[in-house]
Image (cartoon, rainbow, N blue to C red):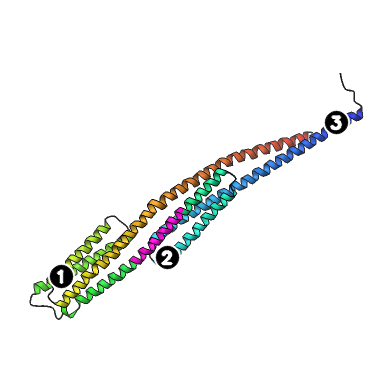
């Protein structure tokens, strides 16, 4: 059984169907536009997150370089300048990770950002601690340099004193010559200790502290022998002053070496492991971002194909 519509009715139905089709096409186009805008927004967010991660990585590298410069600083002015840069780099890294966490739409990404921020703060804090230790080391170096100069002045004053020149005992020249040679050897031993000390500051080789101790011990032994050879009370007193000076010298050397060992420990046991963990987290974040980028590109491509299909249907209609 068929329907026998009048021409007016048929036109009305046809017009209604056309309107429905047009409305459907418009709605579909709007949906595609909305989907594309959302995809574009997600893409921009992803790019912004990746840019923040890159800025954080740059800050990490700068903190790494600052840590090296801190350990190599030879003056308080150089150290202060590097510490200021370290603070600036730390702020930059924290801000970059904060920004990334605030705009990340993925829960896993936000958690990783917060983890990275915590690791970065711990890493920068460890480097900051090495700066405090370097300040102590510079202070010890300055004290050691002053005491080295003081020892040289005392030694030269003793050697050039009247008791060791015009008033020297000439009745036993063999004993006197042995005294002079022994004092020269003691002075050489102290100079060797200072030389090895400064070498250790530049190249912290494991065998150098032992050489410093042996040189100091040799110097003390030789000075004690020289005091036994001396006859004049003033000369004996002068040599005694040099012997009493040696514990002060060794104390500064020991404090310097102990502080340097602590500094190396902070770097190797705290800073380096945390930095390694931080880099792993950042690598995981970048890898995750790449995967999401592939998915997002596929979505945009699919949306472009649907839009093209709709446009073709509209043109064909």
For the residue labelled by badge 2, is the local secondary structure a helix, a strand or a loop?
Answer: helix
Q: Is residue 307 visible?
A: yes
Q: Could you give the CA–CA distance between mark 3 and mark 1, rounded to whole angstroms?
A: 125 Å
Seen from the viewer's position, the closer of residues 93 and 182 is 93
Q: Range of the magenta residues?
A: 122-140
Residue on which disc 1 sits: 226
Q: Going 63% across and 38% down the picture, which residue do you hit?
A: 299
The N terminus: image quadrant: top right
Please name which of the two marks, 3 or 1, marks the residue nearer to the observer: 1
Badge 2 crowding class, 10 Å Cα cut-off, few under 14, some 14 to 19, many 20 or more, is few
Vertical side of 182 occupied by 99: above or below = above
Q: Which residue is mark 2?
A: 78
Residue at 19%, 63% (x, y): give it. Answer: 218
Asked if residue 114 is positioned above or below residue 10 in the image, the reply reads: below
In this orientation, does residue 202 appear?
no
Q: Earlier in the sequence, mark 2 or mark 1?
A: 2
* Numbered label attached to residue 14: 3
The answer to whether the residues at label 3 and label 2 have Cβ atoms under 8 Å apart is no
């Amino acid at each position: 059984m068929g329907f026998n519509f009048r021409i007016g009715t048929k036109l009305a139905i046809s017009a209604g169907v056309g309107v429905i089709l047009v409305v459907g096409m418009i709605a579909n186009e709007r949906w595609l536009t909305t989907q594309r805008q959302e995809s574009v927004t997600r893409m921009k967010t992803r790019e912004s997150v990746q840019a923040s991660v890159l800025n954080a990585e740059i800050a990490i590298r700068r903190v790494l370089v600052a840590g090296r410069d801190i350990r190599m600083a030879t003056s308080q002015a150089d150290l202060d300048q590097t510490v200021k840069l370290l603070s600036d780099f730390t702020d930059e890294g924290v801000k970059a990770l904060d920004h990334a966490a605030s705009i990340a739409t993925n829960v896993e990404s936000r958690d990783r950002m917060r983890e990275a921020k915590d690791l970065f703060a711990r890493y920068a804090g460890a480097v900051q601690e090495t700066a405090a230790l370097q300040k102590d080391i510079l202070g010890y170096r300055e004290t050691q340099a002053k005491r080295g100069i003081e020892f040289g002045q005392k030694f030269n004053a003793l050697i050039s004193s009247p008791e060791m020149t015009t008033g020297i005992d000439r009745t036993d020249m063999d004993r006197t010559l042995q005294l002079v040679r022994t004092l020269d050897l003691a002075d050489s031993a102290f100079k060797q200790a200072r030389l090895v000390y400064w070498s250790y500051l530049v190249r912290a080789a494991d065998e150098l502290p032992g050489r410093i101790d042996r040189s100091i011990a040799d110097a003390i032994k030789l000075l004690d022998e020289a005091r036994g050879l001396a006859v004049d009370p003033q000369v004996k007193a002068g040599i005694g002053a040099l012997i009493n000076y040696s514990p002060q010298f060794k104390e500064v050397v020991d404090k310097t070496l102990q502080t340097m060992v602590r500094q190396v420990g902070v770097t190797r046991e705290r800073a380096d492991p945390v930095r390694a963990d931080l880099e792993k987290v950042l690598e995981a974040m970048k890898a995750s971002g790449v995967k999401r980028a592939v998915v997002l590109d596929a979505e945009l491509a699919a949306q472009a194909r649907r839009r093209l299909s709709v446009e073709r249907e509209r043109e064909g209609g």
